[in-house]
Amino acid sequence: MEHHYICPDEHILSETSIQNLRKNNRLQTGTGNKEIDLEHVRKFLSSGTEKEIDNFIDQMLQNAEEEFASLPMFLRYLTMTIYFAAIKYLDSIGYRIDSLWSMDFRPNDSVSTTDEARQYANQVIKQAIELRDRESTKQQRDLLKQAIDFINVSYSDASISLDKVAKKVNISPNYLSAIFSQEAGQTLIEYLTFKRINEAKYMLRHTDMRLSEIAFAVGYKDPHYFSFVFRKVSGCTPSEYRRGTNSER
């Protein structure tokens, strides 16, 4: 997707035109022929933090010679590079470009000083990082929902494990474990255990199934281990729970 920007002198700049200016040596960042690396900006957007923004901008400005870094043409080049990098990065992680125009995301065509360029760059990078983190959280919650949905229909499988659930949702076990702890406030095994015990309680209340049958039905091969887990979670044995619910009827 080609993004365009109208400069104060009414020239239309695009990512292609910036590349052409580079080829013609009209946007070099000093006598050392250093250029702002678009990919370097994108990498920072993908992994940088808000605390690192000022230092990152300082490094970009330091790459330009002092007398060159304050020129309006270079400052426009700087803001355009950051703008295009932010737009392309956010597009790559699923944001619709047209939705970004409603935000304070467009390049500021009045940028003429280093401080103004620094302020604009800080604003755009900060917004991009906030959107990145928001999207990351959404993706984590979507993955968590997929994992929970799988557990809810597969809890009776005695072989279910962190590795098996992670494989189902196509992420690493360590990442899934981290998501569960962060978003659900408990480990995957804790969730699975509570799910199994709650299902067992329902069966104890509403069926005449034997304890061994209930244990098997909720994913425990060993009835004794099932009773141990049940008591640890509920504070009573399955038999005591059943007698208590029966006496309340």
Image: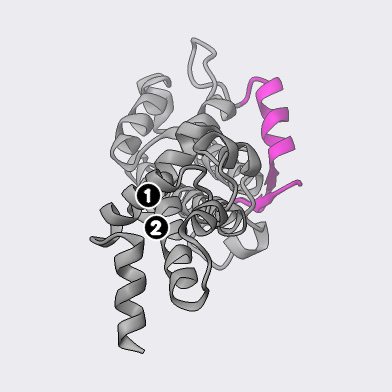
Seen from the viewer's position, the closer of residues 247 and 153 is 247
How far from the left and from the top, in percent, is residue 241? Answer: 32, 69
State yes or no: discs 2 and 1 in contact (Cβ < 8 Å): yes
* Magenta residues (range): 1-26
Q: Quadrant of the C terminus?
A: bottom left
Residue 74 falls left or right of residue 87: left
**Residue plotted at (55% across, 24% down):** 37
Q: Three-letter amino acid code at disc 1?
A: Glu
Residue 81 falls left or right of residue 133: right
Task: State yes or no: residue 84 in magenta.
Answer: no
How far from the left and from the top, in percent, is residue 38? Answer: 58, 29
Secondary-structure class at tag 1? helix
**Residue plotted at (32% across, 48% down):** 228
Indicate how the structure is coloured in the image: one colour
- Residue 244 placement: quadrant: bottom left
Seen from the viewer's position, the closer of residues 191 and 138 is 191
Seen from the viewer's position, the closer of residues 122 and 21 is 122
Residue 129 falls left or right of residue 88: left
Name the residue beneath numbered marker 1: 190
Name the residue beneath numbered marker 2: 194
